[in-house]
Amino acid sequence: MNKGLTFAYRVGANLYVNLTNRCSSACTFCIRQNANSVGEADTLWLEHEPTAAEALAAIEAFPPDSYNDLVFCGYGEPTMALDVLLEVAAEVKRRWAKPIRINTNGQGSLIAGRNIVPDLVGLVDTVSISLNSPSPERYLELTRSQFGDQAFPALLDFARECAQVLPHVVLSTVQTTLTPEEEQACARICAEIGATYRIREWVD
């Protein structure tokens, strides 16, 4: 495993921020299992987690007009570095007024031991949550969350909280990992929550 200091990297039209390699899940389909990076990064494994100043310096290396959205998503769960995430998001909004998205497993409130959604208001425009399955049992099989049976209901609670106060909430599953019937059940969950359902491409 090659490690580096890639704190910001481009994928398509967006700029991604890599805050941590820590994660509360160990998903069976995670790209980390067989690749060192995605997008333009050489490696997303970190020698150390960035401070807010280091993350902002990495973001500054990319001209604001060279990307659309700023996305907190790297080789770890971004809410495991919540304090840095919030500080960086606030500064990005102040300096560049960029749309901000968090790609998350939805376990942030469990990780913090409190409801973190109010912290995101005014900073985060879109929260994209990995739903992965409509079934709590299957969800745990796929994600192997350290929180066990608490993870799935906490994810749904987090999504509901976000849908009440944030502009956009997306729940996603991975193409080919679910049956059409399971995907329909996921779509119903999203409709009940008030979230958009997205089936994202399998990457191997």
Image: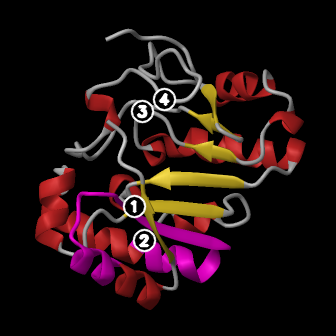
Label 2 packing within 10 angstroms: few (<14), some (14-19), many (20+): many
**Badge count:** 4
State whether residue 121 appears in this view: yes
Q: Secondary structure at mark 1?
A: loop
- Who comes first in sequence, dot 4 or dot 2? 4
> How far apart are the alpha carbons under marks 3 and 2?
21 Å
- Give the residues drawn in magenta, as a range: 158-186
* Disc 3 and disc 4 in contact, CB within 8 angstroms: no
Residue 112 % position (x, y) = 39, 54
Q: Residue at 55%, 62% (x, y): give it.
A: 127
Dot 4 amino acid type: Val
> How far apart are the alpha carbons under marks 3 and 1?
15 Å
Q: Secondary structure at mark 2?
A: helix
**On residue 38, which mark appears?**
4
- Between disc 3 and disc 4, the foreground one is 4
Q: Secondary structure at mark 3?
A: loop
- Who comes first in sequence, dot 2 or dot 1? 1
Dot 3 amino acid type: Tyr
> How far apart are the alpha carbons under marks 4 and 2?
27 Å
Residue 161 part of the magenta-drawn span: yes
Residue 21 % position (x, y) = 39, 30
Residue 155, above or below 55: below
Residue 104 % position (x, y) = 45, 53
Label 3 packing within 10 angstroms: few (<14), some (14-19), many (20+): many
* Disc 2 and disc 1 in contact, CB within 8 angstroms: yes
The residue pinned by badge 2 equals 158
The residue pinned by badge 1 equals 106
Label 1 packing within 10 angstroms: few (<14), some (14-19), many (20+): many
Label 4 packing within 10 angstroms: few (<14), some (14-19), many (20+): some
Spot the residue most to the bottom: 192
Q: Residue at 28%, 46% (x, y): give it.
A: 24
